[in-house]
Amino acid sequence: MFSDAFVGLACTDCGASLTVDDADPEAIAGAGPCPDCGAPRVPKYDLDRVDPEQVRAGPRAWDRDAVLPFPAADALSAAEGGTPSVDAPRIADELDLGGVEIKDEARNPTGSVLDRGLSAAVTAADAAGADLVACASPGNAGQSMAAYAGRVDLRSYAFVPTRSPFSNKAMVNVHGGEMKVVPGRLGDAVDALEEELQADYVDLGAFASPFRHDGLKTVAYELLADRDWQIPDAIVLPAGTGELIVGVVDGLQECRELGLIDDLPTVYAVQAAGCAPIAAAWDDGTISTEPWETPDTIVGELEVADPSGGDLALAALDEVDGDALTVEDDEALESAVAVASTETVEVGLAGGIAAAGLWSLAEDGALGEDDGVVVLNTEAATKAPDVLRSHLMGQGV
Ligand SMILES: [Zn+2]
């Protein structure tokens, strides 16, 4: 069932493991958090079994199945990944940076970077013989889950808050998924899933599934391959659940262990100032995130008040000498508009948070004329074009 290098799952806290040598494959594929301590479990690989040449090339995410849990032939896939790194010379010039590339994850099957993760997570649940998969989501994960579950007629149930964008809600149903729209915010949707869904289900929430963040690491492999394995000076990405930070850092570290790169770039995680539990904990120098009391950002996809991957994201940033920062909503919208109007790329709201982080880092002097930077646009602008358009109305356009 599993790829050759996959050795099993390990708990991120107590260290208990579930290995392919001594556990039922379906039990591994259907596993959730650690039954002993409740912490997330993560896939482990023996990279000595991976030929670096196997993961050097290939346009799509599953072309790198040597470092993923399942062989590509068994994956539920709709050609995730292979997204372009788009050169952004006008922005580099404006900000006096050495170079800027936008890794445009909007060009995934459902317009979100999360397709890489949900492709892996739904594959795992299906391999485990699940009858029902579910998650609470700001929107994109629910849409992506429904899209992959539909490939095998697997029942899926997304719990989304009322503020979730219309396009997410519509497409959950269009992909054949069931959905509950929960009054309130993401935390209310999380509670509703736990309290109301009575059937047995496999939870595909971030870090509820051990496989979801793991699929995201293919972003790191690709952005390095796009640069012919020359590392950028910095990677700037938006953060909500923490899964993208952990996935990208895992991917970078694997690439170094495989000898594909010698050093690691600095990873900057950017959060909306109105909901920034990871950035706040980073500033405080603590190893655990605290729930954000009054989450309030127009970027609903990143309004994750109690991130399931918060602690792991902090540890990951620490391992790569990373940093975390916050930007205001207005800055995110302004940056998304600036990119779309000068560099063609249609940056979504979450990508706008990363782009605003780039502006902030350049203006603060953290990044300068010698620095080549990759910015991740994690979702399509067409998820919520009304929000971007209304930002222009505030300027009289
Ligand atoms: Zn444990």
Image (spheres, rainbow, N blue to C red):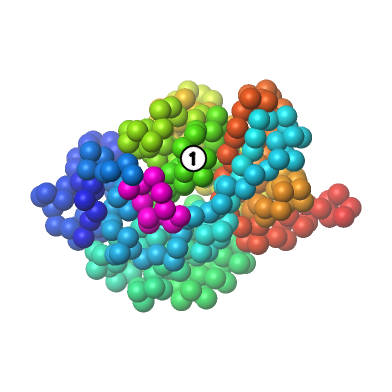
Residue 170 position within the rendered picture, expressed as x and y whole percent measured from the top left = 57, 72
Residue 187 position within the rendered picture, expressed as x and y whole percent measured from the top left = 49, 52
Q: Amino acid at mark 1?
A: Asp
At 23% across and 38% down in the image, what residue appears? 48
Asked whether, in this view, residue 208 is left or right of residue 278, the answer is: left
Viewer-closest of 232 and 137: 232
Inspect this view and state whether residue 153 appears: yes
At 19% across and 43% down in the image, what residue appears? 17
The mark total stands at: 1
Quadrant for the N terminus in the image: bottom left
Residue 168, picture quadrant: bottom right
Viewer-closest of 193 and 86: 86
Residue 78 against residue 43 in the figure, above or below: below
Is the shortest distance between ligand 1 and the CB of mark 1 under 8 Å? no
Residue that label 1 marks = 228
Residue 273 position within the rendered picture, expressed as x and y whole percent measured from the top left = 63, 38
Quadrant for the C terminus in the image: bottom right
Residue 14 against residue 241 in the figure, above or below: above
At 41% across and 73% down in the image, what residue appears? 150
Residue 27 position within the rendered picture, expressed as x and y whole percent measured from the top left = 19, 57
Inspect this view and state whether residue 39 appears: no
Magenta span has 28? no
Give the prevailing secondary structure in the magenta stretch: helix
Q: Residue furthest right?
A: 396
Magenta residues, start to end: 54-64
At 89% across and 53% down in the image, what residue appears? 396
Asked whether, in this view, residue 178 is left or right of residue 45, the answer is: right
Element on which disc 1 rests: loop
Residue 152 against residue 320 in the figure, above or below: below
Viewer-closest of 31 and 335: 335
Asked whether, in this view, residue 395 is left or right of residue 374, the answer is: right
